[in-house]
Amino acid sequence: MVSLPLSSKMYRISETSTPLRLLPSSCAVPTRRRYLSRANHYSKRVNLKPLTSRIVLLTRRRQLDQIVEEVEAAKRRYGRVNTIVMNSVLEACVHCGDVDLALRMFHEMGEPGGCGVDSITYAIILKGLGKARRIDEAFQIMESTEQGTAVGNPKLSSSLVYGLLDSLINAGDLRRANGLLARYGTLLLEHGGPSILIYNLLMKVLWLRETSSCFCHCQ
């Protein structure tokens, strides 16, 4: 019997043997499950719509202290609330005339770890400053938005201009309203030209002038 070399035996065995199937690593399945569970954990978002509806209801009742108390309780429970909830809180502050509280919350929203701000946030703040006749602060925010240095990097839009313009007219500050139109009129024209809102605002200006003139004659 002729003995074959060891290398030849190994060669024949490798030719006739069935290739082994590679089994998945034992740690692969737990790792996948871990990532899936983590994704499911982050995908479960808290439903804050009932809280927002509650804030709207309390705003109509002008119960600002109750709003602040319930929002703080929600922050302790969930860690933080979203921008939609905080925008409704800002609207409540403006509606109740507490612009200082609105500004404080506005700055907290824009800080690191806050819920963030958006164009709606800026529109509410501008409206509140206009109603409180704190026009210089409102124009500073408009300028920072125009220069791109505002927190959250919001875009200067016609809605922001219209919001501040409406507040100025309601406050009776027609001189500043004309100045706002003179400065940002080009922006409004770029977005489709004079709109029905501009027409309504001009009609409101005429009504305020007639009312003030009648009041002066009566005196």
Image: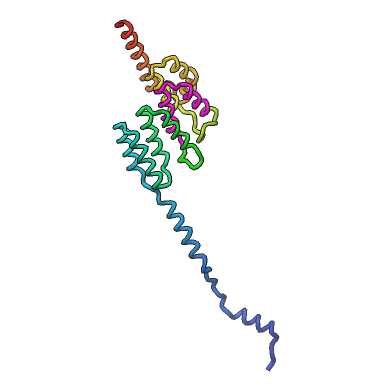
Say which residue appears at 50% left-offset and 38% top-offset.
Answer: 111
Say which residue appears at 45% left-offset and 21% top-offset.
Answer: 135
Say which residue appears at 49% left-offset and 42% top-offset.
Answer: 113
Question: How many labels were placed on the picture?
Answer: 0
Q: Nearer the viewer, residue 164 or 186?
A: 164
Residue 124 coordinates in the image, percent (x, y):
41, 30
Q: Is residue 83 above or below residue 35?
A: above
Q: Is residue 213 above or below residue 10?
A: above
Residue 95 coordinates in the image, percent (x, y):
35, 29
Say which residue appears at 43% left-offset and 33% top-offset.
Answer: 121
Give the position of the N terminus as an image quadrant. bottom right
**Residue range of the region highlighted in magenta in the rendering:** 117-145
Q: Give the quarter of the image for residue 213.
A: top left
Give the position of the C terminus as an image quadrant. top left
Q: Nearer the viewer, residue 94 or 161?
A: 94
- Asked if residue 107 lies left or right of residue 91, the reply is right
Q: Nearer the viewer, residue 30 or 46?
A: 46
In this picture the colour scheme is rainbow
Q: Is residue 10 above or below residue 82?
A: below
Q: Nearer the viewer, residue 186 or 162?
A: 162
Residue 208 coordinates in the image, percent (x, y):
35, 14
Q: Is residue 53 above or below residue 211?
A: below
Q: Most prominent secondary structure in the magenta stretch?
A: helix
- Asked if residue 72 lies left or right of residue 57, the reply is right
> Magenta stretch: residue 132 in it?
yes
Residue 83 coordinates in the image, percent (x, y):
42, 39
Farthest bottom residue? 1
> Magenta stretch: residue 38 in it?
no
Q: Give the quarter of the image for residue 119.
A: top left
